Amino acid sequence: MADDQEITDHLKTIAQLNEPGEVLANDSPFISVRNPDWFEEVAPGSWKAIGERDQLHRRLIDQELRAAGGAQAQRQAVVLAGAPGAGKSSLLRELLGGHEDDYVVIDADEFKANLMREAQDDGTYEGFFKPREVKEREQRGEQFFPMDMASLVHEESSMLSENLRAACFEQGLNVVIDKVLASEDSAQKLAAQLQEAGYEIQIVEAYAPQDVSEERIVERWEKQQEASLDGDDNLGARWVPEGFTDMVFDAPGQRSRPAAVAQMFARNCPSVLSFKVFHTALGEASDTDGSLLLFELRRESVGSELLRVK
């Protein structure tokens, strides 16, 4: 059995190494897009995969499309928004009601896991991703897993998600787009892409207060870390940096960014036919794993008025 103190101590390590300026932060020299053998910077903050890395991206996207071979080409999109730990995954299962196979689920976190599996297989986990500071801690007996380095492929996993989206839109495949939806610019871009591709859109926001979000993040991390230490999984757990959580909950009026952005998306995009908001609270009994429907807005057809129905 995994040792509780070992898990607690490792969480402190990972939280520290994800702080700005540290080796696992998103400004680290070890982030994958800064490897010149893999990526070309085509504009400030914008990269393109090259060579073997481009081939890997194509293979991973093909792999996702093959895995979702039952997805229907009905141009239906579900945009799943909410803070980390808000219960989006369990809520989605309830909402789709056994029709999950009709959709391609696009989740950057799945690409993070796939990229770290590839890194294990091709040697770049040890050869590129693992910083000296991590290796030194390993020599002192601390155990690390590939998903401890997941922040280093954050940008790359987002690129893969966008490319998978484009492939699905081209074929008209039904999609579930799992996003925090904390950025207005990103939401506007997504809305324009979906409209141009002729999709009907449902937005589902899973709202959780910041304390609930943070508690669930830790619980989820500890559970996965324990499973890895017990040998049930060799990838480990993905940590969500505290700074990211703080950013998600800094919208005006003590609102979360996903709440504000999702509402803006629904009101401004005429292709949104349904906007549902669920509230998640620890220990709250409901039909959807602690999520209660707060309200729903609907359009009868594309371009009609968005009206409250609950």
Image (tube, rainbow, N blue to C red):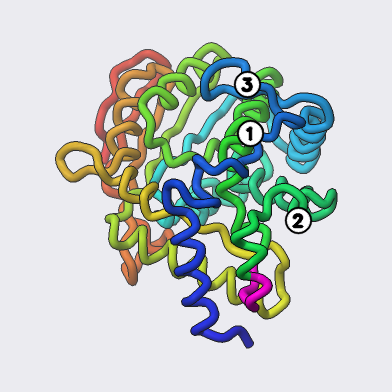
- The reply to whether residue 213 is visible in this rendering is yes
Does the stretch in magenta take in 200? Answer: no
* Neighbours of disc 3 within 10 Å: few (<14), some (14-19), many (20+): few
| 171 left or right, relative to 210 | right
Does the stretch in magenta take in 143? Answer: yes
User: What label sits on residue 41 in the rendered view?
Assistant: 3
User: What label sits on residue 126 in the rendered view?
Assistant: 2
User: What label sits on residue 34 in the rendered view?
Assistant: 1
Instruction: Give the magenta range.
Output: 138-144
Image location (x, y in percent) of residue 272: 41, 24
> Which amino acid type corresponds to the residue marked 2 in the rendered image?
Glu
Q: Describe the element under mark 3 as helix, strand or loop.
A: strand
Along the line of sight, the residue nearer the viewer: 157 or 100: 157
> Which amino acid type corresponds to the residue marked 1 in the rendered image?
Arg
Image location (x, y in percent) of residue 185: 39, 23
- The reply to whether residue 62 is visible in this rendering is no
